[in-house]
């Protein structure tokens, strides 16, 4: 009788798989019992080594990322510099370069320099924009610019499309500078602020800009907005995070309030007067918040806290009444 053929040892099978590449990539698929066994071994080995190769590739990619990927990660994780958040264009750079010599000349005459912190006030009735610079411990008036045009009359802005310019206390950050303006140069004053939002006032894109045309904004002459934009831009470059712009109907003196005592906005203007007086007395921009439908100033808040504390103490000690 013929002896029964013995199966090929596994060691020899493995050696054949690695020494003979044709087993991995045969020209023709093997058939029969032996062919099925070879195909099974080949599939199992290919799967195992494919998984190992993929794992090794992932580990190498994590440990040694390409230079471009590493650079992109660092750029994403790094905080944005002021140069990145302060927008500019070649047109804006050219206009500011034109305005810089005459601005520096006036600054030198008043003992000031480019890049000092700025603060602005607008008076609607007299059509004036005051630009103040922080110098020697307080804000000092640098220049008063004529406002070429504004929309509406005295009084706050209430709704989108009412053709009224706003009144109140606003702040401008670097992102609100607009060098791509259709009106020469511009910046957004930040309307509506928190106070306006609490009173459900609507509107957007209220600017101080050039071209002397107003649709709810404050329009300046082109040379004036170039100087104003340059001073604000340089202040941001020197580290000022935001500047305040206070908009009043007129100088909030007692005489002017008496003239408009029958106006429906008299109570609102009386509230603005506290902020006007705070700056006039200290030459420092007051800290302003909102509460109970009105502007609240730091001095008023301190007085309210002191009065509240006294009332609490009296409630605790009734004999002191």
Image (tube, rainbow, N blue to C red):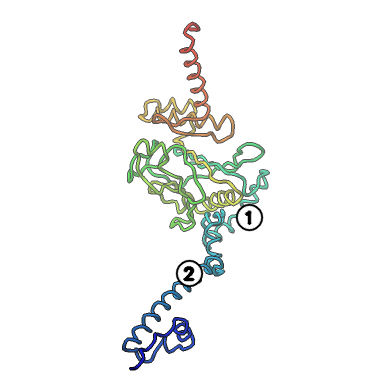
* Residue identifier under label 1: 101
Task: Please tell me how crowded label 2 is: few (under 14), some (14-19), or many (20+) other residues with Cα within 10 Å.
Answer: few
Quadrant where the N terminus is found in the figure: bottom left
Q: Where is residue 148 in the image (x, y as percent from the top left)?
A: 46, 47
| Rendering quarter of residue 269 | top left
Most distant residue in the left direction: 32
Q: Is residue 319 left or right of residue 284?
A: left
305 or 300: nearer the viewer: 305
- Label 2 secondary element: helix
Q: In this view, does 201 lie above or below 307?
A: below
Residue drawn at 55 percent across, 36 percent down: 285
Q: Do the residues labelled 2 and 1 touch (CB within 8 Å)?
A: no
Image x and y of residue 283, in percent: 59, 34
Q: Distance between the residues labelled 2 and 1?
A: 64 Å
In the displayed structure image, the side of residue 103 where residue 194 appears, left or right: left
Residue 293 drawn at (x, y percent): 39, 31
Q: Is residue 205 above or below residue 8?
A: above
Name the residue nearer the viewer: 164 or 29.
29
Classify 299 as above or below 79.
above
Q: Residue at x 33, y 84 (%)?
A: 36
Viewer-nearest residue: 271 or 228: 271
The mark tally for this picture is 2
Disc 1 crowd, CA 10 A, few/some/many (<14, 14-19, 20+): few
Q: Residue at x 39, y 89 (%)?
A: 26
Tell me the tag on residue 55.
2
For residue 6, above or below residue 240: below
Q: Which residue is drawn at 36% across and 45% down?
A: 203
């Amino acid at each position: 009788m013929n002896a029964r053929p013995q199966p090929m040892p596994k060691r020899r099978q493995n050696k054949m798989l690695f020494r003979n590449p044709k087993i991995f990539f045969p020209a023709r698929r093997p058939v029969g019992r032996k062919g099925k066994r070879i195909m099974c071994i080949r599939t199992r080995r290919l799967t195992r080594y494919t998984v190992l190769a993929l794992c090794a590739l992932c580990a190498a990619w994590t440990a040694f990322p390409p230079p471009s990927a590493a650079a992109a990660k660092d750029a994403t994780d790094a905080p944005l510099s002021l140069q990145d958040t302060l927008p500019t264009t070649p047109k804006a750079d050219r206009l500011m370069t034109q305005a810089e010599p005459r601005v520096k000349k006036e600054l030198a005459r008043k003992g000031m320099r480019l890049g000092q912190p700025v603060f602005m006030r607008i008076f609607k009735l007299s059509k004036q924009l005051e630009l103040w610079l922080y110098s020697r411990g307080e804000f000092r008036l640098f220049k008063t610019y004529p406002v070429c045009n504004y929309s509406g009359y005295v009084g706050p802005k209430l709704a989108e499309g009412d053709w009224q310019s706003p009144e109140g206390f606003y702040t401008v950050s670097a992102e609100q500078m607009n060098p791509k303006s259709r009106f020469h140069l511009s910046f957004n004053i930040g309307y509506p602020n928190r106070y306006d939002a609490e009173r459900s006032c609507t509107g957007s894109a209220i600017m101080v800009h050039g071209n002397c045309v107003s649709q709810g904004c404050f329009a300046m002459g082109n040379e004036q907005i170039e100087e104003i934009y340059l001073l604000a831009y340089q202040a941001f470059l020197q580290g000022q995070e935001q500047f305040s712009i206070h908009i009043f109907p007129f100088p909030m003196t007692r005489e002017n309030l008496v003239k408009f005592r029958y106006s429906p906005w008299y109570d609102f203007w009386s509230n603005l007067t506290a902020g006007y007086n705070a700056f006039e007395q200290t030459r420092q921009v007051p800290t302003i918040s909102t509460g109970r439908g009105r502007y609240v100033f730091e001095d008023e808040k301190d007085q309210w806290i002191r009065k509240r504390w006294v009332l609490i103490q009296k409630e605790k000690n009734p004999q002191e009444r």
